[in-house]
Amino acid sequence: MGWTFYNSSGQQLRATADKAATQAEMEAASSNTVFATPGRTHNHPGVAKAHGHHAGSGSLASNSYNLDSTAKDSTGVYTWTFTTDFSAATYAVAGTDTSTVCAVHSDGSGKATGEWVERCYDSNTNETFADGGYDAAFYGDQ
């Protein structure tokens, strides 16, 4: 079954799109002849593969995606555990401090395919750890 596309005036824009994108086509992000389905969108390189928020206590907010948990390991050190592992530890992390106490959140040594270790340094000293909330999004291949 195909789809027919129309503009807001009811004019047909494109005859049909009969083919859903495969995982490989989504990962390549180069085809304009197939359509993306909700079940394949997460395979596109420009889509976050996981995102979430934790408070200073380390508890994961309920509106997270593809995260099993966050855990407070010690003061200012948190481990984020992914539901689906990344294929390599070369994924990107984009985030922001939500508590204004942290200056730097990771030095890169805490990246693994199944988890990311966040290190929150006190914004006054940049040397000692401090507890703080954090929002993060993770991009890469899974």
Image (cartoon, grey):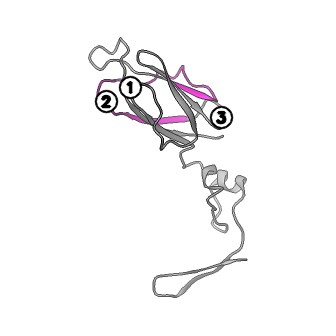
Q: Earlier in the sequence, mark 3 or mark 1?
A: 1
Q: Where residue 142 sits in the image (x, y, percent)?
A: 66, 40
Q: In the depicted view, which residue is nearer to us: 37 or 141?
A: 37
Task: Please tell me whether mark 1 or mark 2 is closer to you in this view.
Answer: 1
Q: Where residue 13 sits in the image (x, y, percent)?
A: 56, 82
Tell me the chief SS of the magenta region.
loop
The circle drawn on residue 56 is: 1
At label 1, counting other C-alpha atoms closer than 10 Å, the crowd grade (few under 14, some 14-19, many 20 or more) is: some
Q: In the rendered view, does 38 fall on the left or right side of 78?
A: right
Q: In the depicted view, which residue is nearer to us: 28 or 2?
A: 2
Q: In the rendered view, does 89 fall on the left or right side of 62?
A: right
Q: CA distance from mark 2 to mark 3?
A: 28 Å
Q: In the rendered view, does 99 fall on the left or right side of 78?
A: left
Residue marked by disc 2? 99
Inspect the image, locate mark 2, and give the three-letter code of the amino acid beneath it.
Answer: Ser
**Occupied quadrant, residue 18:** bottom right
Q: In the rendered view, does 77 fall on the left or right side of 121?
A: right
Inspect the image, locate mark 3, and give the three-letter code of the amino acid beneath it.
Answer: Asp
Q: Earlier in the sequence, mark 1 or mark 2?
A: 1
